[in-house]
Amino acid sequence: MSGTLSFDELKSSVKDGTIDTVLVCLVDMQGRMMGKRFHAQNFLDHSFEETHCCNYLLATDLEMETPDGYASTSWESGYGDYVMKPDLSTIRLMPWLEGTAMVLCDILDHHTHEEVPHTPRSILKKQVARLEAMSLSAMMATELEFFLFENSYDEIRKSGFRDLIPISGYNEDYNILQTTKEEEIMRPLRNHLFNAGIPIENSKGEAEAGQEELNIRYADAMSCADYHTIAKHATKEIAWQHGRAASFLPKWDHKKVGSSSHVHQSLWTKNGEPAFHDKNDALGMSQTMRNYCAGLIKYAPDYTFFLAPYVNSYKRFAKGTFAPTKVVWSIDNRTAGFRLCGEGTKGIRMECRIGGSDINPYLALAAQLAAGIKGLEDKPELPAPTTGDVYDAKKAKAIPSTLRDATETLRKSAMLKEAFGDEVVAHYTRCAEWEQEEFDRVVTDWEVARGFERA
Ligand code: ADP
């Protein structure tokens, strides 16, 4: 599969006129690609070495506000620059944009040229390196669920986000007839991503009107997060190109099911053997898998913020919707936070079902690896799997049910401080607090409708 380019291949494509634009990008705290569009010749001559960006890009929110309280930058420190250092191993085509390639950057301190510790890619890099030091690597896959709407982003914005008409009229779970009608977006999405070097497995209708799911083949953790980020970006751009909108908001209507991003994970040895598999175990789980999963489950409340980063994310955790509410594991049971898949086979893996479609994949994967690594180190007991309808499992520990609760478990997490560093945990705790502060000062439509006359 091609789609990725070496620096020399990029040079040839620029020379023969196939590429004229290079997007030089970082991934921000919200998981978005941010950066600059370079004329390809300038990129080849100069900017491939480095370019610069304002350091508020890693201390802002979805609205590009400048919140106080971040140690890394502020009005007081003058919001200086970071160095964007293109990682030339990430050059790839963006076939849905004419003549365009992209590259992802490492973000370095302007003065010391040290990697900035709170950037999503450097956080994940650190956890991958910790695993590597244990002679292990993680293979991971994220599922992308989203809704497609009849109208464009601009039309929806101009309607005050009122004209939200899903592209289909009924639940399209696995429905071939309805998803045929969405092929104007989904077929180019699959094919363009494939041609960008992203190993697309399939897309399918999901369990609501207008809801689609895109599946990408599992890969090493960093590639998985890159694939997710680029695929999400492409989904929005291709929907936009067709005058439609795609939304990854986890819950856009409380009467409908939400969108998730389940994370599949397994560990492998240096020799490419599945470290999670033991053919002599009744379920096929190795001791390594049991230890990893014990950490993964034990510390789920610590890292819930990285799976549910906004106020809206918590609206998804509702009984009877396939979105979990409890921190337990189960065997092929979609009501639990963690589902064992591929039991008894070399493809044995754990699926974390907590994350919403709004995850930043680098942070979500890094936090889960950190929890799993802690399990490998400390070897806590893996509780027995839960059976039946987990929504009604009274004794099972609950997932933090609000952003406020998840902020507190993040703030206090010794596990995450040890894995990511104190500064990084403080940085994201501030990010979480700010989201809540912004929400708290707004009067919502619900309050007005409920109380306007009757209060
Ligand atoms: P479904 O559950 O929808 O039938 P699959 O079981 O085929 O889908 O896989 C779901 C996701 O898990 C896919 O993205 C796939 O690439 C990934 N996956 C399969 N095997 C592994 C593995 N050993 N480790 C991590 N991810 C895996």
Image (tube, rainbow, N blue to C red):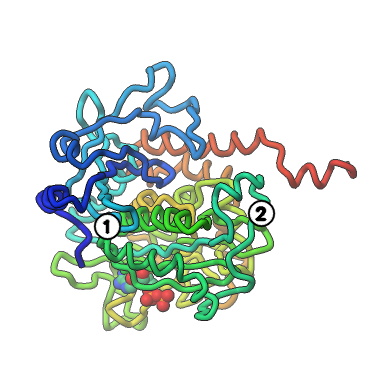
Residue beneath disc 2: 163
Q: Which residue is mark 1?
A: 223
The verdict on label 1 being within 8 Å of ligand 1 is: no
- Is any part of residue 369 visible from this angle? no
Query: Could you tell me residue 328's position as x and y percent?
Result: 50, 66
Amino acid carrying label 2: it is Asp
Q: Give how far across and how far down residue 447 sits, in percent.
A: 77, 43
Q: Residues within 10 Å of mark 2 (few under 14, many from 20)?
A: some
Whole-percent x, y for residue 196 in the image: 27, 60
Which quadrant contains ligand 1? bottom left
Q: Which mark, by number, is residue 31?
A: none
Check whether the beta carbons of the residues at disc 1 and disc 2 lie within 8 A of each other. Answer: no
In the figure, is residue 309 to the left or right of 279?
A: right
Is 242 situated left or right of 89 in this image?
Answer: right
In terms of depth relative to the viewer, which is nearer, 121 or 398? 121
* Separation (CA) of disc 1 from disc 2: 36 Å
Q: Is residue 433 left or right of residue 87?
A: right
Who's the residue at 23% across and 55% down the image?
A: 131
Write the residue at 59% across / 35% down. 438
